[in-house]
Amino acid sequence: MIHRIDRHATELPPPSDPDPNGAAAVQELMGGKFGEMSTLMTYTFQSFNFRDKQKARPFYDLIANIAAEEYGHIELVAAAINTMLTDPAAAKESFPSDSLNGMDGGANKQHFIAGGRAALPQDSNGKPWNGDYVFSSGDLIEDLTHNFFLETGARQNKLKVYQMTDHPAARALTGYLLVRGGVHQVAYARAVELLTGADLTKLFPSPRIPTDKIPECQPHIERGDHKRIYRFSPEDFKEIVAVFKGPHPETGEELEVVDGPPEGAPPNDLPAQPDVFAPDYAPEEIAQIAQKLREQAGLPDEPLGEVGVPAGGEGMVDKVKDEVKEALPG
Amino acid sequence: MIHRIDRHATELPPPSDPDPNGAAAVQELMGGKFGEMSTLMTYTFQSFNFRDKQKARPFYDLIANIAAEEYGHIELVAAAINTMLTDPAAAKESFPSDSLNGMDGGANKQHFIAGGRAALPQDSNGKPWNGDYVFSSGDLIEDLTHNFFLETGARQNKLKVYQMTDHPAARALTGYLLVRGGVHQVAYARAVELLTGADLTKLFPSPRIPTDKIPECQPHIERGDHKRIYRFSPEDFKEIVAVFKGPHPETGEELEVVDGPPEGAPPNDLPAQPDVFAPDYAPEEIAQIAQKLREQAGLPDEPLGEVGVPAGGEGMVDKVKDEVKEALPG
Amino acid sequence: MIHRIDRHATELPPPSDPDPNGAAAVQELMGGKFGEMSTLMTYTFQSFNFRDKQKARPFYDLIANIAAEEYGHIELVAAAINTMLTDPAAAKESFPSDSLNGMDGGANKQHFIAGGRAALPQDSNGKPWNGDYVFSSGDLIEDLTHNFFLETGARQNKLKVYQMTDHPAARALTGYLLVRGGVHQVAYARAVELLTGADLTKLFPSPRIPTDKIPECQPHIERGDHKRIYRFSPEDFKEIVAVFKGPHPETGEELEVVDGPPEGAPPNDLPAQPDVFAPDYAPEEIAQIAQKLREQAGLPDEPLGEVGVPAGGEGMVDKVKDEVKEALPG
Amino acid sequence: MIHRIDRHATELPPPSDPDPNGAAAVQELMGGKFGEMSTLMTYTFQSFNFRDKQKARPFYDLIANIAAEEYGHIELVAAAINTMLTDPAAAKESFPSDSLNGMDGGANKQHFIAGGRAALPQDSNGKPWNGDYVFSSGDLIEDLTHNFFLETGARQNKLKVYQMTDHPAARALTGYLLVRGGVHQVAYARAVELLTGADLTKLFPSPRIPTDKIPECQPHIERGDHKRIYRFSPEDFKEIVAVFKGPHPETGEELEVVDGPPEGAPPNDLPAQPDVFAPDYAPEEIAQIAQKLREQAGLPDEPLGEVGVPAGGEGMVDKVKDEVKEALPG
Amino acid sequence: MIHRIDRHATELPPPSDPDPNGAAAVQELMGGKFGEMSTLMTYTFQSFNFRDKQKARPFYDLIANIAAEEYGHIELVAAAINTMLTDPAAAKESFPSDSLNGMDGGANKQHFIAGGRAALPQDSNGKPWNGDYVFSSGDLIEDLTHNFFLETGARQNKLKVYQMTDHPAARALTGYLLVRGGVHQVAYARAVELLTGADLTKLFPSPRIPTDKIPECQPHIERGDHKRIYRFSPEDFKEIVAVFKGPHPETGEELEVVDGPPEGAPPNDLPAQPDVFAPDYAPEEIAQIAQKLREQAGLPDEPLGEVGVPAGGEGMVDKVKDEVKEALPG
Amino acid sequence: MIHRIDRHATELPPPSDPDPNGAAAVQELMGGKFGEMSTLMTYTFQSFNFRDKQKARPFYDLIANIAAEEYGHIELVAAAINTMLTDPAAAKESFPSDSLNGMDGGANKQHFIAGGRAALPQDSNGKPWNGDYVFSSGDLIEDLTHNFFLETGARQNKLKVYQMTDHPAARALTGYLLVRGGVHQVAYARAVELLTGADLTKLFPSPRIPTDKIPECQPHIERGDHKRIYRFSPEDFKEIVAVFKGPHPETGEELEVVDGPPEGAPPNDLPAQPDVFAPDYAPEEIAQIAQKLREQAGLPDEPLGEVGVPAGGEGMVDKVKDEVKEALPG
């Protein structure tokens, strides 16, 4: 079972200029062969299918816990795509709207037809993710070797996507994921080494991405997130420490296991997009019903959940855009 | 983000006689169009893609929280399949083994070739789950209407699978899921009713399954799990109470929201299956390495994680089979 | 647009002993690459996409009309599969039923889980039909050449399925389709010949199936159905006669165009199968509601639609089985 | 079986400026999960697989008859796509042509490579339609509930496509389909209500599309097509009247069943596109052969089939464009 | 088994201006239903599955040998795509690069994310090639008839792609393949004629492409490549001569079988593209290691393999572009 | 380009008792994610897409050459499947045959319907191979790392299939492939080591399969095939020696590069199966035509191609079965 925590693993900028072409590219990180759904589901199935786990618990705990982190990654990819698809102007269209007319050729048409300017479980060519991308052989060394390779391919994809769009949300996303993917590579390489003696750390960085030259990676490296496994459980997976330890293969710093998830940030509240009926043609009606239901249930006036940037008005969007421009490179 | 809790939502019996044909049927509940991966990913994407959530939080909280429960359901389906595929005799085979020879025609061959007698993200015909099964339109009423229908189809599938195999693990699984799926139907029907006035509760039970006649459903109904939403989060999704309330459409009992996940049960530790290299041809070598690593890390002799039935020896398997025979109907 | 006529193109025997393994094989004729959905949709799209049709109307009429016949063929394949899946004993099971338990390994599990003992748009390996099987290039000669080849492959498949099961419904189905497929081959060969001079009739029979040695083909050949195109339209497609004419390549008989569809036969009314909820767990409740609605609408006591063998009681099934045994070879 | 009637359910404008990007979007209405192939095939299989139909004939007749109407809808979607892909200038290209060079990035490349500027059974991302989109459980209430939801999703898709292109053919298409899809929703909602008592009509309109604000919907509403089921059969499906009756949920007008199909309109004869060999590189050769064959068969000089706008010359295209501009909004 | 010969079947121009949109279209010739992977794998499987081959060896030899030629065709299609994706400017980018930013909407995004500006086994809509495209029935006449049709469809596709891009590599590729595909059509038509008497040669050219009007076809026709089968084996397939003989159906020239493959040309050495890590972020490091290994192995300073245009510097690219402009039409 | 050599890489036993269930399992080695089509196409595309190859030729030569060997592996897998599907009794059936009736549930139905008792590009669940299984990133180190992992997974699959059937053809096949796959692992591990210093050889054997305990592996190990790369080219790929050298990681023996392919064996001539029309319903007619054509072409009476066991009569089959029983273990 899981507890869900309504926070993002890292902060993303709020919507600015929409970038449907870029959002279509980011889909590879969601539903591509090396996307986050593949890492999430591969490690999840490996943990479900682990046999004789009491006797090999440090390895079970490692895989099961990284699986948990990956859930936060599909969450973050979705948020980045949604941010890139949000059009502040769409809220002001009359009905029927012209806001989708003449959509850029590079866009994923189903972002608008099947979804409400929102993420889909597809790759960058619009092909749905499928279960064939999951690898769970049951052979522990083979699974770990695979996982190391899977993270390698994933990092390659992340860099490519980074280079395909300069939208601030895509850059913030890939900057973060490049760092965290690197940690998972270290973890799996270490596990393979401990089981076989093979020194996979010589392969680092793999691919040979000089992460520290990427501006959006730097804050995460400075914070130490490149050498840290978070333990995503209140009580479980405590035996990770038996595997994830020793020096980081690139920096030599000591690897560390941190109890609990990263602090992260509350998700932004993305504004309604009535032109695609998200959440409705007339979202204020839903808001009224919800408010009445909240009153009947004795809930306070303010919502109990926290968000980062509120859905807000246009003024906010402009302000945010200024801040983003200052805060982000390029 | 999520916290992962290493417990199952309900207790499953340990391995007894293997049932590969039945396990292949249970795959529909994992990777079929109406399987648990579809409910998990549909609600998860709907929660990721929710817009203007502060204004409609009771509905957001409901969807996001049911998504969290579904993670526990794919976990349980996997455990049932793995239990049904486990062959206590397989551990005693010499190399190369004959244990897979002449496998029953109804089996999913990839359970053995791609997996280590273990679950795959496929349906009952061996077709991989794919992202086309996710529905996330962004239109709140449409999404909720869809979810009601999705749970309806899912319950139909569960009953069919119940009838296709009498293996105790499949029966325990479907008995539990039929009850919990019914609760999700109630939740979505109530949400649609509150937003539109349409009285979907007249459709219950849907399909017209008399759940209380199914022996494996009865303990869950007696415990009250048919009228209860668990809140799968330490701090979030508190506004569910504004929607999930009022009388249960079939029994008239008051619906209730419970803080925290169900007590559940620790997962069984399924034994190694060396004939399919799970976790290895010689699992004791892995155990030795793990034990050494545990010592080096200062961990106690006993594993820190809890399991239900331990992987144990053959005697245990026989004993457990006796207990199961007594405890379960049919 | 279409008019739908609630009759089958030929008569099928009623349910006798169920044959799920055979029914799974017959699915190839529904949803395989060379199945009836492929012929239906290929000719339908070719007719939709035909350009400059007034100038080439005899060819347009030919393709559009054969498309119409193919609708009757998917109808017939579905009826045969449903007949083979029907289990008279299933109606008498208590709830929950054991009727699906231990299902033969060769069965398509989704026949029971996704469908109610009923046909699906899949092939004999349970893979869904897909639009890639449609060929519609817009090039008239290429489309016609393709169609000739498509019918060739389809006939090969029909013979193979004939040989894979001796269930009377499968035999009646394939006997009929082998004859009709042969007519379509003649039609397309003739069209190619008239446009290019190439004498495709030398290829007949193709594949070299001696249809007249197959008992279930014989009644259709005797009736003359091997040399006849039916015009499936009240007013349209009258220019077929400009193409479909001359001697039959195998028998030398004159080809003929018949106005209107074949007489065919009313479809059998297959009995309810409550164990798979088709049409319900308690079908009599639906019957009562329907009867009340019929009365309110002033409809007569007897249904206005005609069926062949009524859904009836068990006695009937036995009787029919006797008749079938007498009437059919093997 | 079917009779095919060579008319369209409604009139579409003739080709004007080509819009390949828009045509690619319209494909969602053909081959998407909620496209017309899904409604056609879902209802068709439900009617094939219906059990005990004499006892539940009003419901059988309803489903079987709507299935028949859907055939006319895939026909209309294909015609709109073909119209949008037609390039009057393409006919004048020398060989080899440059007409496809530099094709707009949003286009579906297979519209030109696999097809002859023509419709394909694919969705808006170029993915083929597949049989997984068909739902036919055999459980009558579940099937009807599903159908209501399917039409809901389909209407959402139609509006999105409407907004993605302002090509007159796409607008005329979606205007018509939005109205007819609404009728099917009413029909299925009424059927569910009569079987269960659940008042689904409170959900209307669903999604909350104010159809009467859409100019291209208005003529169909004015004609009464929003409250009318056409009976697409000469003799069958007469018991629909027992279900489709009572007040329209939005307007309160009495629902009505009309014998026979709508008057509709003859399809336009789309001009040859020799640059993509449709129907040939030198279409006049085919025309000559056809004319000779017609003479030999004793057919009159004028084709026996009727078309709307003839394939004609360029002057006609310009003239038609003027008329279209006058007749259509925006 | 095979011997691989590191030469191309014909010469392709070196990289000039990149054309990602055109490269995406050329993918249809690789991984489309009628692409070269389909011809390669269809003939390969037919040769693997051929029964009683000693008694029908001339036909076996024909199919097996054409299969061998097709390997050279997928090689050539890949080379053309890679040439079109190569960007000489990409080598000079700093890290992280902006070279992929704002990529043209018509591009296949996975060309850059999954591949290193390189070919993929996909079609022009980015859909992976799949085994359903292989036809191998075992029935010799049916297989040969199919092959004739497959080549017909393939030629249609090649012309369409020719018309969709004027990049010199695409034009050189399609010019060559149109001629060779025509030879395969002749071969299969002749085989069918010899087995059945059917005169398929009347269908030529099929489609009605006047190949001799296409500038890029002319050199190959002049060389005689339109009437020649190369025997792609040192010792085998010598019985082709019993089938591939007689006059060419279009020109009347005598068909001929040539021992050994065509002379062809050494492949160009496409330059590194460090922005997509092909073969690395810092390719010179790989070059140094390779050079050292070569020395250790006693290999000469110059590589033992031959290439056409060397990967070279920018000056070369410009020079080559000039030559290409002079040498190629349009 | 390639030369094709009509010999198998190793000898397979002739048909004995058919084993359709086993043949279906062996399909995983053809068309599964880790099957030989995946290794063939992955290395082939990597060689096509290799950039700056002159500077990294030892690595290019290694990959291109292993790609060539893989062609021989799909050939061998097909031959094993075909051998297992061959039924000597099928040749004696009258028409229409009952030979396919009641086919074992574990069989792949398309082996008989789509193919003529013959191999298909599918996996063990009947799912077609697809291009998504190809990995070709362009990044040399990443590609090589992937290849090492791919071979690891492939070896795991081979052992599982070995254990699923004891048919002599399957055992001979997997025995050979396990040994050759191990060589490819060594080759890729060595390449990675030379480029990065990472000592992957510590992972051997991977998976931990004690190959020397498998009887069908032993003759190949004794012959030295476990330490040998064959150079599959008359003139090219000579720089492999710069990479494939040093001690074998398991045995310490010196690795060696052999010029030219292994001696192998001529393929058996599998007998006609008229019940599935392979190569025809009446194969003797084809034989007569072929013989006449051979005479006309001046070919000698005996076919020019060599086969192992001739298609022959039944007596031969029995004799061969005896030999096989003696020669093979178990």
Image (cartoon, coloured by chain):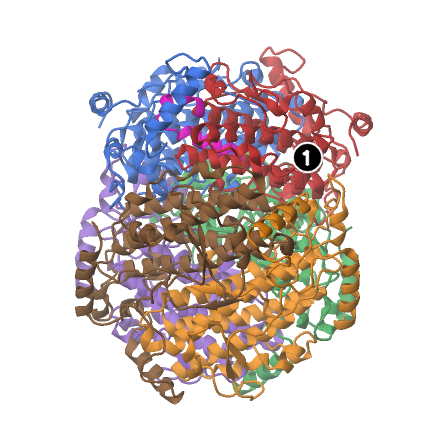
Chain colours: A blue, B red, C orange, D brown, E purple, F green
Which one is nearer the viewer's eye here, D3 or A273? D3
**Quarter of the image with the N terminus of chain A in it:** top right
Query: Percent from the top left, x then y, of residue F109?
Result: 64, 58
The residue singled out by tag 1 in the image is B210
Chain name for mark 1: B
Judge whether D135 appears above or below F88 on screen: above
Q: Amino acid at mark 1?
A: Pro
Residue F155 falls in image quadrant: top right
Please name the predominant secondary structure of the magenta segment in the image. Answer: helix
Which one is nearer the viewer's eye here, A195 or E155? E155
Viewed as shown, does residue B277 lie left or right of E183? right
Query: Percent from the top left, x then y, of residue B25?
Result: 66, 42
Query: Percent from the top left, x then y, of residue E96?
Result: 28, 32
Viewed as shown, does residue F252 lie left or right of D71? right
Q: Is residue E52 visible?
A: no
Q: Which residues are magenta?
A: B39-59
Viewed as shown, does residue F78 lie left or right of D171? right
Residue B220 falls in image quadrant: top right
Viewed as shown, does residue D218 lie left or right of C211? left
Which one is nearer the viewer's eye here, E227 or C322? C322
